[in-house]
Amino acid sequence: MKRADSLLAPLIKNLKIEDAVKLGRIKAGWADIFEKPVSLHMFPAILKEGELLINVDSPIWMQQLSFYKDKMTDKLQGFGVKAVRLRLGKVIPWEKEKRGEE
């Protein structure tokens, strides 16, 4: 019997939704990838062709996080992330994301 992921992988690729699936996995595991308080001030927004755009909730946090972009990229490599870009934007607390709220 084939595993579900071996059946879904070609379908996901054909539908060209690989980045969306990877982004969903990143969002679901955000609290495990980055600990509090950092995870509360940033949240993944868009993944496109290996570049992850992360929304950050304040200029102060953006300044601090800019020094750790390489470390963030290293932590996210398992999801196919090759580069991280930061921008000021809306940050949805990951607890709400897990519950499907906004």
Image (spheres, helix red, strand yellow):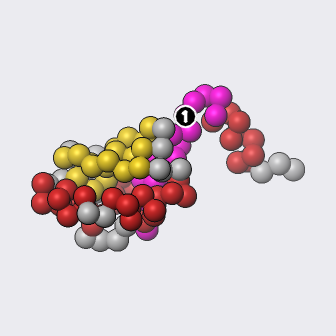
Amino acid residing under circle 1: Ile
As drawn, 20 above or below 94: above
Q: Residue furthest top?
A: 15
**Residue nearest the viewer, comparing 6 with 66:** 66
Query: Does residue 98 appear left or right of residue 64 in this picture?
Result: right
Q: Residue furthest right?
A: 1
Majority SS type along the magenta span: helix
**Residue nearest the viewer, comparing 63 with 98:** 63
The picture places residue 72, in percent across and down from the top left corner, at 38, 61
Mark 1 highlights which residue?
A: 17
As drawn, 62 above or below 33: above
The picture places residue 66, in percent across and down from the top left corner, at 25, 58
Q: Residue at x 37, y 50 (%)?
A: 84
Q: Residue 10 is drawn in which quadrant?
A: top right
Asked if residue 44 is among those painted magenta in the image, a careful observer would answer: no
The picture places residue 89, in percent across and down from the top left corner, at 20, 45
Q: Residue at x 51, y 57 (%)?
A: 77
Query: Does residue 52 appear left or right of residue 12 in this picture?
Result: left
Q: Residue at x 47, y 50 (%)?
A: 82
Q: Residue at x 44, y 38 (%)?
A: 48
Asked if residue 18 is among those painted magenta in the image, a careful observer would answer: yes
Q: Residue furthest bottom?
A: 36
Whether residue 83 can be seen here: yes
Whether residue 99 can be seen here: no
Q: Which residues are magenta?
A: 13-32
**Residue nearest the viewer, comparing 79 with 8:** 79
Query: Does residue 32 appear left or right of residue 7 in this picture?
Result: left
Secondary structure under the numbered disc 1 in the rendered image: loop
